[in-house]
Image (cartoon, rainbow, N blue to C red):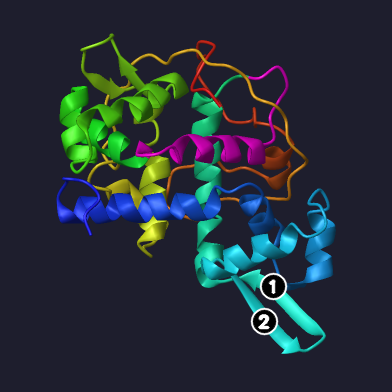
C-alpha cells in the first residue's frame, strides 16, 4: 500500500528506510547490537556488557531484535541458549560509522567530546521523526517545495495542514530551512549531508551491498549545501560498547575503535566549521 504520492519504487524505498529506522532507533537497541559483536553469547555474558539496563529490560529488547531479524536466539540445550547477530544484523554494523561521520560534521559541538554511540543515537532520533524520511526525500529531489505541495506528495490522504508540525520539527532540528511563513522549504546543509547515511540505510534495508549507496537515485548525487543553522546541546548517556569500523564502499574515515567510542575523532583533517548544527 502506497504511503505517499511518489512513484512506487520511491515510495517503497522510503517505507523500507522508515521501517529500518523504527527497528534500530529505540533506546539501547544499537548498544545491544554492538555488545553482541563477535561470537554468540549467553544471556548473562551479554547482560554484563550492558549492565546499565535494569533487571527485566534486556529480555524484551532481545526479543524485539530477534523479531526484527537482527539477532538470532539459538537453543543448544534447555540450559544453554546463545544470542548473536543474524546476517542482516551484522550487515547493519558498517552503516554506523557513516552516521558518526555525518554527526561529527553536522551535529552540535558539545562542551565535552561525545562518544560516537551518543552521536549515532542522536542522529537516529532526528531521522525517525514522523514523516521525516518522506519530506527529506522530496526536498532532496525537488530542491524547493511549498508546504501545500509537500502535503499533497507526502500525505495525500490527510488534511494538507497536517504537514506543518513535522515540517516545523525538521526546521527546529536543523535539517530543513525556510525563509518564513508562506515561503518554500528546502534542505539545510545538514539535510543535504545526509546523502551517505540515507543511501546506506536504503541499501541495507533493501538487502543490497552498502557500496550501492553511492548510486542511490536521490541521495547518491550530492548537491550544493546551504549554510548550517545553530542548535542546542543534549544530555550525556552511559558508556557504550565497541563499534567495528566500516567495511564497505561508502565513504567514511578509517577509525579505530578507541576513537569511535571515546569521543569524536580529531585524527582526520577537517576544515573549520562555524559553531552550530542540527538540534539533538
* The magenta segment: 110-132
Which residue carries the number 2 mark? 74
Is residue 196 depicted above or below 171 in this figure? Answer: below
Which residue carries the number 1 mark? 83
Sooner in the amino-acid sequence: mark 1 or mark 2: 2
Query: Residue 247 location, x and y as percent?
Result: 52, 56
Position of the C terminus by quadrant: top right
Image marks 1 and 2: residues in contact by CB distance under 8 Å: yes
The number of callouts visible is: 2
Of the pair 105 and 183, the residue shown nearer to us: 183
Note whether residue 277 is visible. yes
Residue 155 is left or right of residue 202, and the answer is left
Residue drawn 67% across the image and 82% down it: 74
> Disc 1 to disc 2, how far (Cα)?
6 Å
Position of the N terminus by quadrant: bottom left
Is residue 91 depicted above or below 102 in this figure? Answer: below
Q: Residue 112 appears in which quarter of the rendering?
A: top right
Q: Residues within 10 Å of mark 2 (few under 14, many from 20)?
A: some
Query: Residue 209 location, x and y as percent?
Result: 39, 61
Residue 121 belongs to magenta span: yes
Amino acid at each position: 500500500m502506497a504511503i505517499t504520492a511518489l512513484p512506487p519504487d520511491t515510495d517503497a524505498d522510503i517505507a523500507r528506510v522508515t521501517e529500518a529506522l523504527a527497528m534500530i532507533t529505540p533506546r539501547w537497541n544499537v548498544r545491544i547490537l554492538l555488545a553482541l559483536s563477535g561470537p554468540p553469547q549467553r544471556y548473562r555474558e551479554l547482560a554484563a556488557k550492558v549492565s546499565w539496563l535494569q533487571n527485566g529490560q534486556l529480555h524484551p529488547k532481545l526479543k524485539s531484535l530477534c523479531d526484527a531479524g537482527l539477532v538470532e536466539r539459538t537453543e543448544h540445550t534447555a540450559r544453554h541458549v546463545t544470542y548473536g547477530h543474524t546476517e542482516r544484523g551484522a550487515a547493519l554494523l558498517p552503516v554506523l560509522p557513516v552516521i558518526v561521520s555525518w554527526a561529527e560534521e553536522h551535529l552540535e559541538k558539545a562542551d565535552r567530546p561525545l562518544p560516537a554511540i551518543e552521536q549515532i543515537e542522536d542522529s537516529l532520533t532526528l531521522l525517525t521523526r514522523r514523516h521525516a524520511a518522506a519530506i527529506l526525500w522530496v526536498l532532496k529531489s525537488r530542491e524547493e517545495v511549498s508546504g501545500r505541495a509537500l502535503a499533497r506528495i507526502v500525505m495525500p490522504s490527510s488534511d494538507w495542514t497536517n504537514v506543518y508540525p513535522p515540517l516545523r520539527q525538521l526546521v527546529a532540528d536543523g535539517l530543513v530551512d525556510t525563509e518564513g511563513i508562506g515561503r518554500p522549504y528546502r534542505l539545510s546543509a545538514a539535510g543535504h549531508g545526509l546523502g551517505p547515511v540515507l543511501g546506506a540505510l536504503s541499501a541495507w534495508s533493501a538487502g543490497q551491498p552498502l557500496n550501492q549507496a553511492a548510486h542511490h537515485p536521490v541521495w547518491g548525487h550530492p548537491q550544493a549545501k546551504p549554510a548550517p543553522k545553530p542548535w542546542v546541546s543534549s544530555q550525556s548517556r552511559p558508556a557504550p560498547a565497541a563499534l567495528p569500523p566500516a567495511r564497505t564502499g561508502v565513504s567514511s574515515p578509517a577509525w579505530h575503535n578507541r576513537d569511535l567510542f571515546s569521543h569524536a575523532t580529531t585524527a582526520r583533517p577537517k576544515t573549520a566549521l562555524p559553531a552550530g548544527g542540527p538540534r539533538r
